[in-house]
Image (cartoon, rainbow, N blue to C red):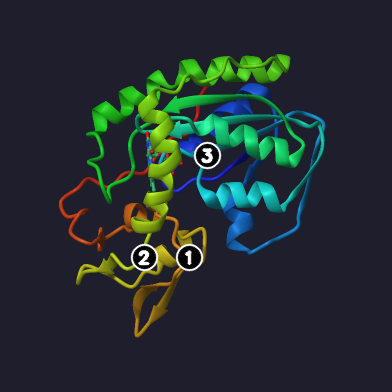
Amino acid sequence: MILYFTGTGNSRYVADYLSKLTDDELVCINDYLKENKKGETFTSNRPFVFVTPVYAWRIPRIVSMFIASNKFVGNQKAYFAVTCGDSIGNAEKYIRRLCDIKGFHHMGTAQIRMPENYLAMFNVPDESTCNKIIKNASYPIRKLADSINSEGTLAPVKASIAGIVESGIVNGLFYKFQIKTSGFHVTDKCTRCRKCEEVCPLNNISFLDNRPVWGNECTHCMACICRCPAEAIEYKKASLGRRRYTNNKEVTL
Ligand SMILES: Cc1cc2nc3c(=O)[nH]c(=O)nc-3n(C[C@H](O)[C@H](O)[C@H](O)COP(=O)(O)O)c2cc1C
């Protein structure tokens, strides 16, 4: 079973690709979060494959919590495909820890470089660069699919000293000081289409006086800001003039 969480589509794309190459079922974690479903049991005779973006060099806390709070029955082997704009740092260490708690046999973590989507801090690459990055991702995706199909283990991801610090202390600081909803706001371009409310995986956006307001559950997935058809959402001043990014590509083998 291939389970994925996504903000802007990269992890959906990778999960879909893996599902086609392994002929395995695809489950969208966003749907479970959206419906606030808890204590679910997922059953699979094939290994569990979790596909997720990296947030501050670790898998998002929302994904860790999803894994920790649901039951996974059947095959106890678990693979992780972690999409990133640059590097997952030492994320694997924390994935292993989570696997130990859940009783999963960690079969490996694959780092899959995809276009950067964190426009609250960084520029998104231009379209042709994004296309090249996505094309280059085919190789690690196919390699991972081969390992899943043969139920083989992956080589550990090597983390640099910087990666160890980033996944450690920097991750904690990032969640404490950066992941806040207070910076999101709409401009006059808002058409009140309510798309932001629909795409927020955490149901953190509601409408008040015909304008979106953000609650406190945000995980900075960038879905609202990147999927707004009118580009009416900004994050403080950081997102001004920055290209919005979504990966809506269909996987063709
Ligand atoms: C809150 C946040 C934090 C991120 N942190 C990192 C990071 O530490 N390292 C990195 O290489 N990319 C980082 N990124 C980029 C994403 O991991 C990457 O673009 C990912 O493929 C997005 O997946 P999605 O489209 O499925 O949401 C971050 C993105 C967000 C939104």
Write down the residue under mark 2. 181
Neighbor class of circle 2 (other Cα within 10 Å; few <14, some 14-19, many 20+) is: some
User: Residue flagged by tag 1: what amino acid is it?
Assistant: Glu
User: Residue flagged by tag 2: what amino acid is it?
Assistant: Thr
Quote the CA–CA distance across marks 3 and 1.
Answer: 18 Å
Residue shown at 74% from the left, 41% from the top: 102
> Residue lying farthest left?
241
Neighbor class of circle 1 (other Cα within 10 Å; few <14, some 14-19, many 20+) is: some
**CB of mark 2 within 8 Å of CB of mark 1?**
yes
**Helix, strand or loop for disc 1:** loop
Is the shortest distance between ligand 1 and the CB of mark 3 under 8 Å?
yes
User: Residue flagged by tag 3: what amino acid is it?
Assistant: Thr
Write down the residue under mark 3. 52
Write down the residue under mark 1. 217
The mark closer to the camera, 3 or 1, is 1
Residue shown at 26% from the left, 27% from the top: 129
Looking at the image, how many numbered discs can be counted on the residues? 3
